[in-house]
Structures are given as C-alpha cells and as structure tokens.
Amino acid sequence: MAVRDLAVPGRVRETLTDGALAPGWLAHGLLVVPFLLDVEVPLALQYAPLAVSVLVLGLPHGAVDHLAVPRVRDRPVTLRALAGVGALYGLLGGAYLALWFLAPVPAFLLFIAITWAHWGQGDIYALLALADVEHLRTRPQRVATAAVRGGLPMLVPLLSYPGQYRRVARALTGRFGVGPAELAPLFRVETRFALGAAFALLSLGTLAVGLARAERGLAERGWRLDAGETALLWVFFLAVPPILAVGVYFCLWHSLRHIARLVLLDEGSVSGLQGGDLGPALRGFTRDAAPLTAVSVAFLAAFYYLVPVRPANLAEGVGLYLVLIAVLTLPHFAVVSLMDRVQGVWTVSPSG
C-alpha cells in the first residue's frame, strides 16, 4: 500500500534511512576530512558531481512531478493530470526563463531564494516522515527549521568561499551579459558578516527551541539527529568549496531524500521496502524519471543556442546548466508545495 501521509511504517522507514539518509551522512562527513586537512582538489574535479547530476539523481529527481501530483492525491494518472502538470511547468518555467533574459540579476537572486525555500522544505519532510522527529511541534518551528536547512547550502558557502561563490554567480548571469559590478554588493565583507551572524543566531535559536520542546530533552533521538545534521552541514559548507559541496549535496542529500518521498507513493516500491529491498523502488524511479530527464537534457542542448553569450569553458557550461535547474526549480517547488499541503507537512495538532 502506498504511503501518502507522514505516517511511514517502521520497517519501510528503516529501509529508507539506510538507502536515502545514511549515504548523505556518510558522504558529507567523509568529504569534510580532506579539506580540514588542507588537501587541495583540482577545480575540474570539483565540477564532477554537478556534471554527474545531469543524468544521476540530481536532474532526474524532479522528473517525476507529472506522476507525483496524481499519486499524492490518490488519483489515477490521466492525460488531464499530466497536461495540468505540463501546463504548470510551461507557464511558471516559461515566465521565469523570460525573466533571465529580461532581468538576469533579479532572476539570479530569485533562484537563490526559491532554492533556499525548496531545499528547506525537502528536509522538513525528511525529518518528519523519515527521521520521525517529534520536537518540531509548531508551524513556526518548522518554518524556521526549513529556513536553516535551506540556508546552509545557499548562504554558508558565501561566508567561507566568497571568491568561488562569485565565480558561480558570474557563470550564471554572465550568459545574459551581466558584468561583475552588478553583483558586487552581495560579496562585501560587511554584507557577508551581517548575513552570517544572523544566520548563526537563527540556527542556534531554532535548535534551542526544539530542545525546549523535546519531551526527553537531550535524550530525544529526533532532536539529536536534527542537531547533528545541522552541525554536519554547517561544517561541510564552511570547509568544502561551493562547487563541489553543492554538487554533492544536490545529489546525495536533497535528491535522495526527495526520491525517497516519491517511491513511497508507489505501491510496488513500498512492498519491496517493507521487505528491506530497495531494488523495486530504484527500478521504479528510474523507469518513471527517464522520459522527462531525456526531455530536459534535450532542452539543455537547445538552450546552448538560445543564450546571448554561449559558454566557452567548463565553468560557463555548468553555469548554463544551473540556469536550466533554476527554470525547472520554480514549477518543481510548486509541485512539492502541493505535496506538502496534501501530506500535512505544515499541519500541526492542536496540542502542538
């Protein structure tokens, strides 16, 4: 039986913890070590996770939205349902793509804001459904925790690697004729200091409120997991260069967790998970995601000829890919927000 709410059966949750949560913990924990020891990684190698994400986990994780909407509502997958999601992508994605051509700096800032919100909402679902936390008892707590979780990959790299963050920003906006001076205020020392101090206070304050709401205090496993993940991601994004850090996070943290959410909507996948078998879930997701992943890759190839300034090197090519991700993220965010509403991610009990 498919799981369409936050009440994931224990055996299924255990299987998904091993398959969707543990790989992210392990990869992020291990990758921190060489950078804490000042080991240098060639820039070309740092781009590898983002390059891989075109076909593995990253781009495909959003290629099942057309099935997720009817499935989460427990409705059949009809042509009308598919057309509705297609229209959503056409309208929102098309409007946002036009904004990149007309006003690339606001489009870039909107990309940061949307990704911040979307990656935060993804972690809230994972904490509630997969980690089974109990201390996020109110909607403001969940919103604050989402703001922290989304800000870790979007803001923290700006604090420790402003130079590389600036290069990535220029790789995106430079395809549309934006000069370096237009983004300069974002990278001033005083701007980064103010943002970093405020975000650190938000992180600590959110965890402190969660601890106060935890019935067993420090003994509560859910709070310890939340605090441990937050600390791990703080260290990870402070230590690891942004290009590599965001690529690894996109594939092995955010995408894996969303894929876990998707497979819970498929009855065949859930049956396998109940028996501790990830195989049916992986095969089912690959089958469902393949068609629209191929369409997205084809659009990326066409996009190369549409931008005013074509990529001339690897960094600029990745920048173009990230613009495509930005265009797809807005309608994807809308779809996941619908899933949140149906599954009660932001709904709390009166006693909470």
Image: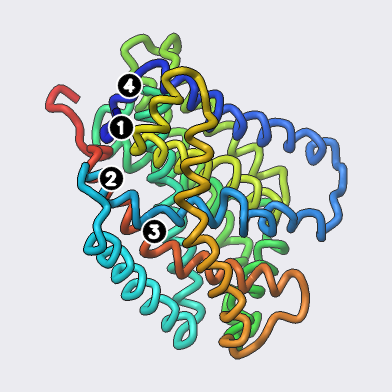
Q: Earlier in the sequence, mark 2 or mark 4?
A: 2
- Mark 2–mark 1 Cα distance, whole angstroms, equals 9 Å
Q: Earlier in the sequence, mark 3 or mark 2?
A: 2
Q: Which residue is mark 2?
A: 71
- Between 180 and 249, the residue placed more toward the observer is 249
Local SS, label 3? helix
Amino acid beneath label 4: Glu
What is the tally of numbered marks visible in this picture?
A: 4
Which marked residue is nearer to the observer: mark 2 or mark 4? 2
- Mark 4–mark 3 Cα distance, whole angstroms, equals 27 Å
**Marking on residue 332:** 3
Left/right placement of residue 74 relative to residue 325 reads left
Q: Earlier in the sequence, mark 1 or mark 4?
A: 1
Classify the position of the N terminus by image quarter. Answer: top left
Q: Which residue is mark 4?
A: 134
- Mark 2–mark 4 Cα distance, whole angstroms, equals 26 Å
Circles 2 and 1: CB atoms closer than 8 Å: yes
Picture layout, residue 312 above or below residue 339: below
Identify the image's colour scheme: rainbow, by chain, secondary structure or one colour.
rainbow
